[in-house]
Image: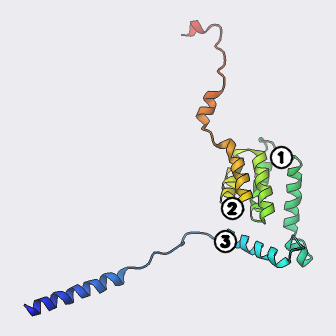
Amino acid sequence: MAPSILAGAAALLLFLTWSLRRRTPPALLRSTDASAIAALNRAQITLLRTGPGRSDGAQATGTAPSAGVAAQRTANEIADGVIPPTADARQRAQLKARLEQQLRGDGQQRLQAMGIARRWGQPDVLSVLRRGLRDVDPRVVREAARGLERFRCCPCSAARARPQLPLPRNVSRTR
């Protein structure tokens, strides 16, 4: 009887070591792309390194990046009320590209992009507004939520809420 108990204990010990050795820890954040967060962190670090007197990393180095100046200029033009009409697809695509470029900037540029997207109010900017909901700055998130307010209703119920056109005079002949 002693050899069978000893063999059973050895088999149980082998089974436990085999089963515990096979388990691998799950990979954390394998599919998450953190490049946007890293870019935001780098921008905030450069703002902290420039000092309290300066508000811009470009002022600290003495050079202004041309892409940032161009984005700021177009954003100022858009802020003045130059928002493309809904019929011009090329201008809409350019504005959306500018807004996405501003989303890669600092907090003030992201806030300005959300304000422009909210005022424009077209379905083209839904992706930009949804990205704004995941931002780290609460002001940007608040502006994105305000921009999404107009898209929160069901299109079917909005169509039913419109007043019905009056029936033609000869409706009795058609029924």
Residue 140, position as x, y percentages in the image: 73, 57
Of tags 2 and 3, which is closer to the observer?
Answer: 2
The location of residue 155, given as percent across then percent down, is 61, 36
Residue 90, visible in the rendered structure: no
| Of residues 6 and 53, the one drawn nearer to the viewer in this rendering | 53
Q: Which mark is residue 151?
A: none
State how far apart marks 1 and 2 are (Cα). 24 Å
Q: Disc 3 residue type? A: Ser
User: Tags 1 and 3 in contact by the CB under 8 Å rule?
Assistant: no
Which residue is pictured at 20% across the width and 87% down the height?
A: 11
- Circle 2: residue type: Asp
Question: Which quarter of the figure has residue 137?
Answer: bottom right
Position of 107 relative to 20 (above/below): above
On the picture, is 47 further left or further right than 16? Answer: right
Mark 3 lies on a secondary structure that is helix
Circle 1 SS class:
loop
Q: Are circles 2 and 3 on residues that touch, CB within 8 Å? A: no
Label 2, residues with CA under 10 Å away: few <14, some 14-19, many ≥20? some
Residue 32 vs 81, above or below: the answer is below
Check disc 1 and give the amino acid type: Ile
Viewer-proximal residue among 71 and 57: 57
Dot 3 corresponds to which residue? 35
Q: For the residues marked 1 and 3, what is the alpha-carbon distance in whole angstroms?
A: 30 Å
Instruction: Identify the residue under disc 1.
Output: 83
Which residue appears at 89% of the width and 73% of the height? Answer: 54
Left or right, residue 129 beside residue 68: left
Farthest-out residue, front: 52
Badge number at residue 135:
2
Figure check: 64 above or below 170: below
